[in-house]
């Protein structure tokens, strides 16, 4: 008997992407009439057979029944059973025929076109297809659309229920290179235009020539992510699914996350807490993948464990501990972890999962689950620290202990700043001649790097500057007149040439950012170019067709290499911030000015004083070493009631003798009142201090191994000046107030004295400063003796 589904001229491979032919199917006037009558009676209402999972009743007003957008319902996925993928199998008669799913009766047929014509010829869509001439482009396109809709509807139900066979557009062959076809369904995603299931790696190729993609439907979004939006939603939160889950890498870890309801609940709690912050999405994804990796390790250690719920059962406590240790790379001989932060994070995640399980048990009145959760939390409190966290924290501490402290090289910072200024100038001119997408992206990266470098801000905070924050900064009120009077002329000029904007920092604190006039011009150019590039985002520093802002750390890393810096790895926002805070200590800022600096950097003053200070090694060498030498020489009593900075040695040779471990009598140093010797000693010590400051700016030298060195060309016995009585009298006249207060004058005071006393004009201001300090020290010593 003749096959009722047979269509003349149709081969076994037609349904694998070939054009469906129906040459011998005769279209009757009744079918055309049925189509016309049906179109009249439709009256902007969808027929029942056009229902697709998730289609809402609000779509009834849609005039175009065949281009209706598919809305996926908010349903969770349970993949407890295997999901298979339809494969191309070789039979004795050749390749097996592909089974397509009928959109109306939801059954598989190898001759889907004949089945639709013979059984469903009165359906509106089939009647419309038959109204077009044979072999016409429109007829072939509509055949593909109805076949894809049937397969998509079937695939959706399979993934929702976690059981069945996925029907792809092109079936893969079952060869030795593909031994586990049941795990391949996750590598397919539907096309957002024609609903056909394609390999994710080939989806972009298909969409370039998709016949159902009209000009109105064109999208610049990621085709894989758009296709995932047409799949059943994982969990109950649509925001979590669209913003986090579909963007995760499709691998075995994601599959474990998708199958575990407790992990999904944990993910939704994290999203509810941090989902509003775009930069926290990666953090949420990372926490989930940690649990997914743990599940894989647990299943390899003990096959009975199938989920996090069974893993936190007290019966499996020892297995859980062993799996975490294995995953984190525990060295049992040294009791150290290869990844010490991982077990600490897993501990927090597992305790949170146990609390969620307990909450569910209380709501559902499930005493068994509640007992499991309570017992796990008890074990966690009593046993976790000794078996897991103690070794992890010790490993972290040992890694940080005595770690070399490196800071950016001053010349590298200058080189990077010069490179950024030059690049910004050329890119600005290029954009003025015409908007170019590449030039726009490059200018945005350069501007962001300049802001981070100038303000020493955290790269993530600077990257998230919004247009509203920038506009609010431009409309700030002018300075208060009373405050303006208290500022110097130079400070008032800075206030006029710089714009202050406020952004959101850590823990919701307000963090200021200063923009120079050049930076404001660049931001203005970027905002104007956005209109031509059709960029619609609240962030200033964002590239076309991107939803997230540019990563500031990537920009600094890129430009620090391009500028030719000696140590580009040290030009990071964190090290630049510490460089600013520590170098400001050289200025000996008052507490109020320290508070201003700490607030500008987004710190609490206690954090600023504890972590953003000169390294302890520098302080020990420069400050504490003075006291140790005085104690060893028995002269500590001379410096009663003095601060570290007020202690000066009478003879620099004392330090050299102690460092060389050579013993020499110091009787000649007890009563040395010679001002000339004092002047030379203090000058040499000050030069050594300058050298230390220079070395502190060198990133390639460890601060903990750095020693004081003497400048080239300066000898211990050279450069002395014997001050004349007239010169000393001039110094006493100009610095009488400093002699009374015991303070050392600064550069400005010394320059003013040189201008007023011609006899001092032949001396450098630093020479005069050292002379004053020597005279003050000599005066104090004489007062002490009397």
Image: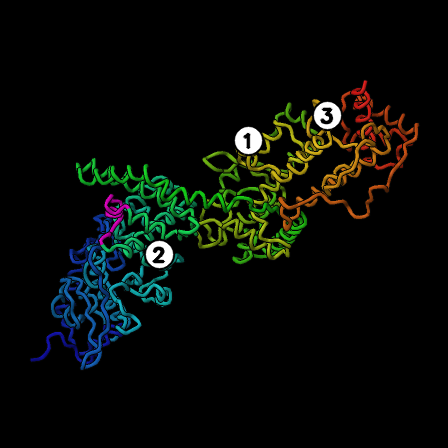
**CB contact under 8 Å: marks 3 and 1:** no
- The image quarter in which residue 690 lies: top right
Closer to us: 17 or 413: 413
In the image, residue 83 above or below residue 319: below
The label on residue 529 is none
- Please rate how many residues cluster around mark 2, counting C-alpha atoms within 10 Å: few if below 14, some from 14 to 19, many from 20: some
Is residue 313 on the magenta stretch?
yes
| In the image, farthest residue toward the left | 1
- Residue at the spot of label 3: 639
Of the residues tagged 1 and 2, which is closer to the observer?
A: 1
Q: Which residues are magenta?
A: 304-317
- Residue at the spot of label 1: 605
Of the residues tagged 3 and 1, which is closer to the observer?
A: 3
State how far apart marks 1 and 2 are (Cα).
Answer: 45 Å
Of the residues tagged 2 and 3, which is closer to the observer?
A: 3
- The image quarter in which residue 247 lies: bottom left
Q: Secondary structure at mark 1?
A: helix
In the image, residue 19 above or below residue 64: below
* Residue 602 on image: x %, y %: 53, 35
Closer to us: 570 or 186: 570
State how far apart marks 2 and 3 are (Cα).
Answer: 73 Å
Q: Where, quadrant-wise, is the C terminus in this rendering? A: top right
State how far apart marks 3 and 1 are (Cα).
Answer: 31 Å
Q: Is residue 547 visible?
A: no
- The image quarter in which residue 363 lies: top left
The label on residue 225 is 2
Apparent side of residue 107 relative to residue 651 in the rendered image (left or right): left
* Residue 7 on image: x %, y %: 16, 77
Q: Secondary structure at mark 3?
A: helix
Q: Earlier in the sequence, mark 2 or mark 3?
A: 2
């Amino acid at each position: 008997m003749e096959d009722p589904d047979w269509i003349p001229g149709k081969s076994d491979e037609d349904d694998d992407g070939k054009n469906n032919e129906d040459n011998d199917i005769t279209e009757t006037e009744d079918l055309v009439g049925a189509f016309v009558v049906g179109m009249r009676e439709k009256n902007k209402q969808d027929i029942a057979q056009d229902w697709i999972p998730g289609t809402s009743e609000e779509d009834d007003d849609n005039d175009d029944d065949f281009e209706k957008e598919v809305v996926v319902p908010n349903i969770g996925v349970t993949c407890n059973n295997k999901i298979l993928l339809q494969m191309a199998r070789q039979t004795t008669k050749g390749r097996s025929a592909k089974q397509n799913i009928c959109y109306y009766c939801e059954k598989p047929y190898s001759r889907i076109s004949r089945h639709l014509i013979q059984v469903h010829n009165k359906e509106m869509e089939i009647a419309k297809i038959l109204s077009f001439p044979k072999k016409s482009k429109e007829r072939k396109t509509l055949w593909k659309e109805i076949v894809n809709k049937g397969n998509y509807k079937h695939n959706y139900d399979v993934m929702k229920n976690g059981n069945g066979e996925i029907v792809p557009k092109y079936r893969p062959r079952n060869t030795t290179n593909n031994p586990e076809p049941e795990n391949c369904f996750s590598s397919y995603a539907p096309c957002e235009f024609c609903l056909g299931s394609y390999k994710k790696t080939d989806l972009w190729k298909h969409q370039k020539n998709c016949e159902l993609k009209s000009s109105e439907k064109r999208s610049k979004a990621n085709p894989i992510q758009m296709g995932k939006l047409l799949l059943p939603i994982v969990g109950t939160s649509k925001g979590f699914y669209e913003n986090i889950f579909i963007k995760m890498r499709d691998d075995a870890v994601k599959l474990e996350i998708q199958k575990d309801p407790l992990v999904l609940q944990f993910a939704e709690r994290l999203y509810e807490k941090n989902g509003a912050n775009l930069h926290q999405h990666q953090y949420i994804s990372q926490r989930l993948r940690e649990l997914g990796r743990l599940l894989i390790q647990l299943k390899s250690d003990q096959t009975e464990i199938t989920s996090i719920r069974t893993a936190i059962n007290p019966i499996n406590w020892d297995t859980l501990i062993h799996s975490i240790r294995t995953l984190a790379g525990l060295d049992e001989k040294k009791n150290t972890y290869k990844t010490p932060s991982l077990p600490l994070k897993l501990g927090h995640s597992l305790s949170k999962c146990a609390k969620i399980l307990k909450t569910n048990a209380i709501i559902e009145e499930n005493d068994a689950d509640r007992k499991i959760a309570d017992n796990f939390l008890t074990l966690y409190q009593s046993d976790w620290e000794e078996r897991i966290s103690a070794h992890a924290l010790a490993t972290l501490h040992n890694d940080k202990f005595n770690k070399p402290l490196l800071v950016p090289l001053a010349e590298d910072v200058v080189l990077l700043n010069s490179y950024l200024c030059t690049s910004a100038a050329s890119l600005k001119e290029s954009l003025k001649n015409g908007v170019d997408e590449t030039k726009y992206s490059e200018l945005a990266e350069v501007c962001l790097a300049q802001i981070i470098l100038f303000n020493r801000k955290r790269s993530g905070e600077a990257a998230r500057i919004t247009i509203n924050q920038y506009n609010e900064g431009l409309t700030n009120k002018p300075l208060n007149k009373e405050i303006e009077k208290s500022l110097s002329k130079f400070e008032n000029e800075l206030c006029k040439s710089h714009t202050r904007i406020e952004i959101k920092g850590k823990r919701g604190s307000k963090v200021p950012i200063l923009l120079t006039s050049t930076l404001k011009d660049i931001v203005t150019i970027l905002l104007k170019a956005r209109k031509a590039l059709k960029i619609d985002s609240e962030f200033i520093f964002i590239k076309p067709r991107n939803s997230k802002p540019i990563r500031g750390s990537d920009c600094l890393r890129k430009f620090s290499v391009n500028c030719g810096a000696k140590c580009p790895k040290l030009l990071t926002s964190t090290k630049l911030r510490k460089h600013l805070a520590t170098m400001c200590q050289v200025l000996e800022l008052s507490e109020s000015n320290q508070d201003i600096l700490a607030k500008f950097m987004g710190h609490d003053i206690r954090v600023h004083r504890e972590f953003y200070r000169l390294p302890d090694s520098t302080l020990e060498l420069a400050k504490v070493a003075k006291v140790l030498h005085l104690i060893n020489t028995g002269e500590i009593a001379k410096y009663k009631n003095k601060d570290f900075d007020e202690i000066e040695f009478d003879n620099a040779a004392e330090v050299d003798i102690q460092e060389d471990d050579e013993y020499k009598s110091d009787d000649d140093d007890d009563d040395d009142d010679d001002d000339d010797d004092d002047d030379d000693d203090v000058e040499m010590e000050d030069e050594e201090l300058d050298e230390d400051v220079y070395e502190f700016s060198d990133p390639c030298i460890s601060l903990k191994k750095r020693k004081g060195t003497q400048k080239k060309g300066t000898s211990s016995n050279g450069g002395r000046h014997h001050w004349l009585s007239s010169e000393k009298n001039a110094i006493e006249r100009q610095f009488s107030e400093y002699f009374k207060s015991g303070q050392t004058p600064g550069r400005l005071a010394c320059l003013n004295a040189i201008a007023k006393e011609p006899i001092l004009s032949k001396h450098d201001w630093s020479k005069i400063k050292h002379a004053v300090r020597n005279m003050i020290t000599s005066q104090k010593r004489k007062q002490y003796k009397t």
